[in-house]
Structures are given as structure tokens and as C-alpha cells.
Image (spheres, grey):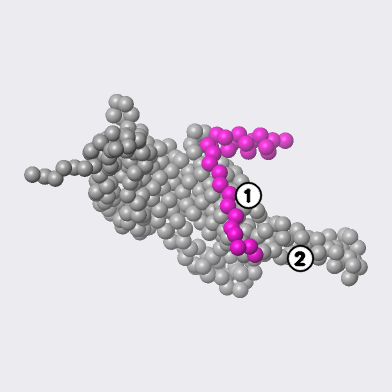
Amino acid sequence: MSPRDVHVDKPEVQISVRRVGVTSIRVPIQFIFFEEQPAIVVPTFDVYVNLPAYQKGIHPSRSYEATVEIVSQHAEKLNRLEDLCADIAREQLERHDYATEAEVVAAADVVYARKTPESDMRTYESCTMKARAIASRGKKGKISFRQWIGVTVGGITACPCAQEMLRDQVEKKLKTELQLDESRIQHLVDTLPIGSHMQRSYGSVMVETPEDFYLDAIQLVGLVEQAMSASSYELLKRPDEATVVQTALNNPKFVEDAIRQMVKNVVEAYPDLPDSMELHFIQRNEECIHRHDLVAEETITMGEARRQINENHSP
């Protein structure tokens, strides 16, 4: 006689739970689509389903089995990570017939090649590629999907506030100690680099995409990097290092500046993305002169982002 399945018992406290699941499932994928070519990755999956009030618990082994089986079916095929998440979410609803919603979140480190800015040497950089999918079961059993693709990328920001204070000190010294006239002073401070404190920065973006909408994650990497003061590199020769620092100092940004620029970059890069699509942004700057960090975050639809940009930048 088989033991009783405790999961289907009625709970003592009958309250529905929005998300219950299994996290940190690591399954190797032979190919994932990145930079218009295949890349080998080992993503981590978090899978969830909702739990009705009348049931004591989910069947967690089903969550794990469904994830592994779907990934295995996609082995040696060229996959998009967000499509893979959607397939896993669908299978979660098949295995958990009591659930009406399933969510799958995936993250994987991806390595790509690039050239250093001055020496033109090959260097290998990494970013975190992310995907998310939500499958919902309607009243007639039809399953609908929402899916997102995104990246987290490291870079550099230079503090505008510290730079402005140093600029003011330089102007005063040039005037009092060298007794230069105003035009000469202005020319020097506009020409010579004015220092500031640097921050190691991490920009993240998640873009909701409709079915059959192609979005290569490598393009998102560029959009995030362009929102910061400068890109960072694993390899830098001395001329490269000078260029990176000078680039950052010429483009100082607050954490708020970076996230606003990210929103603008995504809106301009995807004019065909529907207004209803959801965008999520996070910018985190690791301070070097403080013991705390700075964070900015925004969740907005493509339509609302377009509206704000058009209204606030109209002549």
C-alpha cells in the first residue's frame, strides 16, 4: 500500500500562496543564442507555481523533473533563454494541475570577446544573461505567456558632484595663484581633465517581449554600458587605461542619470516594441569614498517611457 500523499491534504490555515517553488536548479545547456552565435552556458533556474488555499503543499520533485526534462529536450539545439523559460513554465502547469500560474527565472554568465579601446587587443568580458517567463492558465484551460530577456553588465561611473567641487577649486587656484584671466581659466578647465571619484557600477535591464519578437541580448549589453560613464575591461594596457579614465571623467553621471539613460537607450533601440511591454531597470553604484552603495530602480511600460521622453524633450 502506497503512503498517503501529504501534499494534497487540506492545510490547517487555508490561505493561497502566490509563489512556491524550487530555486537554484543548475542544468547545462549546450547552446544558447547570444551575440548572433551559439554559446555554452550553465544557467540557474528558479521555478515557481501558485498554491491554492485548499492544498497543503506543492510537489517539488515535479518542479525539478519538469525543468530537467525540458532542458534535455532542447539539448544541442539553438535556444533563446526566454523561450526555454516559457517551455519550462508550460510544463510546470502540466505537472501541477492545481496551479493556475507558473513562473520561471533563469540567469547564466556569458563570456564574449571584444577589443581594447587603444591597443586593439582581444579581451574576454562577461555579463549575466537573464530571462523570465510567466505562464497563466485561463478559465477554459488555455495557457498564455509573458516573457522577458535581460542582462546585468558592469561598468564605471564618475561622480559629477565631486568633479564640480574640484573644478571650482582649480578655478580659484588658477585665479589667485597664477592670476590668469577668466577666459584663460575657462579654457584650461574645459581642456584639462578634472578628477573625481570613480564607482564600479552594475546596470541591469529586463525587457518584456511579445511572441516571435527577436531581441539579441548582446545589444542590451551595449545599451547598458552606454548609459554609464565608461565601459570596464578585463585587459587594459596603459594607453587603454588612460582612455577609459578620460572617457569616464568626460561623462560623469549620478546613479539616477545612468538609469534614465538606460530607459532612453532601450526606447530608442526598439521602436517596434509594443507600448504594453514592461521594462525593468536597476543601476547599482559601489561607492569608493563611502561605505554605502547607491541604487536606482524603475519599472515602466514601453508606452509610458515613450510618453515621458517625448513630453520632456519636446521643443
Question: Tag 1's secondary structure?
Answer: helix
Q: Residues within 10 Å of mark 1 (few under 14, many from 20)?
A: some
Vertical relation: 139 (above or below) 117: above
Kindly identify the residue that appears in the image at 75 percent across and 58 percent down: 164
Secondary structure, mark 2, is loop
Where are the magenta residues, as a range? Answer: 289-315
**Left or right: where does residue 308 sit relative to residue 83?**
right
**Where on the picture, by quarter, is residue 298?**
top right
| Residue visible at 68% across and 61% down in the picture | 249
The answer to whether residue 187 is seen in the rendering is no
The N terminus lies in which quarter of the figure? top left
Residue 272 position, x and y percent, is 51, 37
- Kind of residue indicated by mark 1: Glu
At 36% from the left and 39% from the top, the residue drawn is: 17
Q: Provide residue 195's location: percent of width, then percent of height.
A: 71, 65
Along the viewing direction, whichever of 2 and 259 lies nearer the viewer: 2
Reply yes or no: does residue 280 show up in magenta: no
Q: Which residue is mark 2?
A: 192
In this view, the residue in front, 93 or 61, is 61
Q: Is residue 197 visible?
A: yes
Q: Residue furthest left?
A: 1
Is 309 in front, or is 159? 159
Q: Residue furthest front?
A: 12
Q: What residue is pinned by disc 1?
A: 256
Which quadrant is the C terminus positioned in?
A: top right
Residue type at mark 2? Leu
Q: Position of residue 8 (x, y in %)?
A: 23, 38
Q: Is residue 290 magenta?
A: yes
